[in-house]
């Protein structure tokens, strides 16, 4: 933690004038950021060397799997092309829109069943904010369904039409054949980097006091979010901070429509998991974004890289939530393995406006 690193050095400055201490602290903080950047560079370089050293073995096995199942996936894609009438507009506009809608409400329904049925008793031990949304109000679920569906259909489809026009000008992979495994993997990595930058800065912008009450406040009605509240947002936020960063990567890369469909599916499942309210075994940790809903001014990004560089995760890193921020390969509840350190922490009930 940066504060922990800085504090011992600041103790040496006791007794010096306040203005000199402030200047010294700024220098120390800059040094800490630079240290973090150097550590990140070392990790990236080391990882790259390892991957390069293993590239022949890894590539062989992954490509072997891709090749063995390639005919199957190509056959499925051929069916989709026939269903869409080989129409580019259908592939880029209606395809991602329908797929995202089905994935969102299909997977979201699973999480909602945990909240509304007796399954909640089993999943309760995995809740990140205990005793919230108990019981979950059906009227809130219905209201969320209406708002999210409006965003996905009324706001989302026009945005995808604009994206289609952009890709007609920019150009994209129009091949009838699916792209290779290597290229799909490369584009997915780029898309992850793009969404980290796009979502982080868009998210911080709509938290500005002049925009928050008009746009982003609706999303934070859910202080303890549920999965289907992921896109419970103002239509402007939906296009600018949600679907925009997701589609930016494929549009800039000129991706194959199949890669776009795959990326939209992964992004949709990720945002559902981030808002689900449960830290389930074997699932990616949703602790960071849940902490954002709880504390409001922490953890704006997707990966946490920009949060660390900008210092917008200091409170999160000092909490037990950060210790729980990992994928667990055990059925033991995360809160039992890493209990809260503050016995006076207040429990916040469900949805707060």
Image (spheres, rainbow, N blue to C red):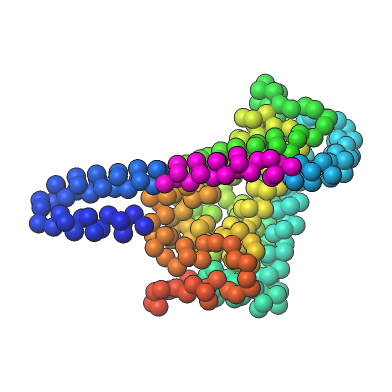
**Figure quadrant of the N terminus:** bottom left
Q: Please give the name of the residue rendered at 68% of the width and 64% of the height, measured from the top-left corner.
A: 111
Q: Nearer the viewer, residue 264 or 33?
A: 33
Q: Where is residue 202 in the image (x, y as percent from the top left)?
A: 49, 42
Residue at image position (74%, 52%) is 103
Image mark count = 0
Q: Is the magenta stretch mostly helix, strand or loop?
A: helix
| Residue 334 x, y percent position in the rendering | 55, 71
Is residue 135 shown above or below 65?
below
Q: State the image coordinates of residue 138 (x, y, percent, origin top left).
A: 67, 68
Residue 169 vs 217, above or below: the answer is above
Q: Is residue 286 shown left or right of residue 178?
A: left
- Between residues 84 and 257, which one lies in front from this camera angle? 257
Q: Can residue 140 be seen in this view?
A: no
Side (left or right) of 265 relative to 195: right
Looking at the rendering, the stretch of residues picked out in magenta corresponds to 39-60
Is residue 54 located in the magenta-colored stretch of the structure?
A: yes
Which residue is farthest top? Answer: 169
Q: In this view, does 240 lie above or below 137?
A: above
Q: Residue at x 10, y 51 (%)?
A: 17
Residue 245 rendering spot, x and y as whole percentages: 58, 40
Residue at screen point 57% across, 60% down: 285
């Amino acid at each position: 933690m940066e504060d922990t690193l800085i504090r011992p050095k600041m103790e040496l400055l006791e007794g010096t004038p306040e203005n000199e201490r402030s200047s010294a602290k700024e220098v120390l903080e800059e040094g800490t950021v630079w240290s973090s950047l150097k550590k990140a560079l070392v990790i990236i370089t080391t990882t790259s060397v390892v991957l390069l050293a293993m590239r022949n073995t890894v590539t062989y096995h992954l490509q072997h799997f891709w090749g063995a199942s390639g005919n199957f996936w190509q056959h499925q894609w051929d069916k989709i092309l026939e269903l869409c009438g080989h129409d580019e507009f259908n592939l880029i506009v209606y395809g991602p829109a329908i797929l995202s809608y089905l994935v969102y409400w299909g997977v979201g329904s699973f999480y909602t069943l945990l909240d509304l049925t007796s399954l909640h008793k089993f999943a309760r031990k995995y809740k990140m904010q205990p005793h919230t949304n108990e019981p979950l109000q059906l009227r809130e679920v219905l209201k969320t369904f209406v708002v999210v569906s409006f965003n996905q259909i009324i706001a989302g489809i026009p945005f995808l039409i604009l994206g289609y026009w952009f890709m007609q000008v920019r150009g994209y992979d129009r091949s009838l054949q699916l792209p290779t495994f290597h290229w799909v993997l490369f584009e997915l990595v780029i898309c992850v980097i793009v969404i980290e930058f796009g979502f982080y800065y868009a998210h911080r912008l709509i938290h500005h006091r002049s925009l928050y009450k008009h746009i982003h406040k609706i999303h934070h009605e859910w202080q303890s979010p549920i999965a289907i509240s992921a896109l419970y947002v103002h239509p402007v936020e939906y296009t600018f901070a949600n679907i925009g960063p997701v589609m930016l990567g494929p549009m800039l890369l000129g991706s194959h429509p199949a890669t776009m469909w795959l990326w939209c599916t992964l992004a949709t499942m990720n945002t559902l998991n981030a808002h689900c309210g449960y830290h389930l075994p074997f699932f990616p940790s949703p602790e960071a974004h849940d902490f954002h809903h709880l504390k409001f001014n922490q953890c704006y990004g997707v990966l946490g890289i920009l949060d660390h560089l900008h210092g917008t995760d200091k409170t999160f890193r000092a909490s037990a939530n950060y210790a729980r921020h990992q994928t667990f390969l055990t059925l033991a509840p995360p809160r039992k393995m890493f209990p809260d350190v503050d016995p006076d922490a207040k429990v916040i009930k469900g949805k707060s406006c």
